[in-house]
Image (spheres, rainbow, N blue to C red):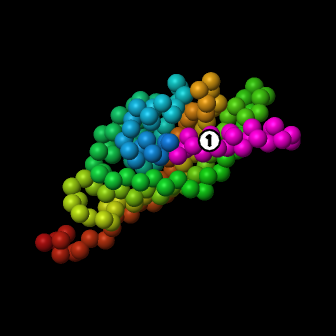
Amino acid sequence: MTQRAELATVLDRLAVDELITEYAAAVDDGDWTAYQALFTADGRADYRSAGGIEGDAGQIAGWLAENLSLFAMRQHLIVNRRLRFGFLDHDTGDTARVRADYVNPMRFTGDGGATAPDLVCGGRYDFGLLRTRDGWRLREVVVHEKWRRLPDRDPAAVTG
């Protein structure tokens, strides 16, 4: 591999990493316009394993806006990113796949001064990306929720 090709690969890796980070920030910040802009025109997402829906980016943004409004605090941590570039029409680097693990603590709206999250879930994302004229964009997002935990509550508060 030439130095030029190595530099192009490094730049692509950085751009893909930035896209995944922007995805997490858009969801955590509730910026649904930015969320939709991360996708290709035909981009889709599948949140069914987490109790959600599957649909195009606009449908998913609407569903997320409604359901995540229950949480005053959301903080995606997307880690262990494994990136593989693929081929489209025999041109290296037009597609990419990212498998990444996530942990997502959230706090319900109205919890006052609580500092601990009310809900924590974790699992794995599968991202399918496409290089476009505007840079890398998400073509597919599939959530594989593996676990969910509610914090232990004081039994007296639950029964009393």
Quadrant of the image occupied by residue 120: bottom left
Q: Position of residue 108 (x, y in %)?
A: 28, 55
- Decide: is 73 above or below 4: below
* Quadrant, the C terminus: bottom left
What residue lies at 69% left-to-right and 40% top-to-bottom? 11
User: Quick one: 90 or 146, which is closer to the camera?
Assistant: 90
At 37% from the left and 52% from the top, the residue drawn is: 74
Where's the N terminus, which quadrant? top right
**Residue 97 appears in view:** no
- In this view, the residue in front, 38 or 49, is 38
Is residue 4 inside the magenta stretch? yes
Q: Is residue 14 visible?
A: yes
- In the rendering, at what x and y percent does residue 106 appear? 35, 56
The residue carrying mark 1 is: 16
Q: Secondary structure at mark 1?
A: helix
- The residue furthest right is 2
Residue 43: image x %, image y %?
Answer: 52, 30
Say what amino acid the circle numbered 1 marks: Val
Does residue 75 appear left or right of residue 124 in this picture? Answer: left
Q: Magenta residues, as a range? A: 1-21
The residue at 75%/38% (across/down) is 8
Residue 51 sits inside the magenta stretch: no
Please give left or right for residue 90 compared with residue 138 in the image: right
Residue drawn 48% across the image and 30% down it: 37
Neighbourhood count class around disc 1 (C-alpha, 10 Å): few under 14, some 14–19, many 20 upward:
many
- Mostly what secondary structure, the magenta segment? helix
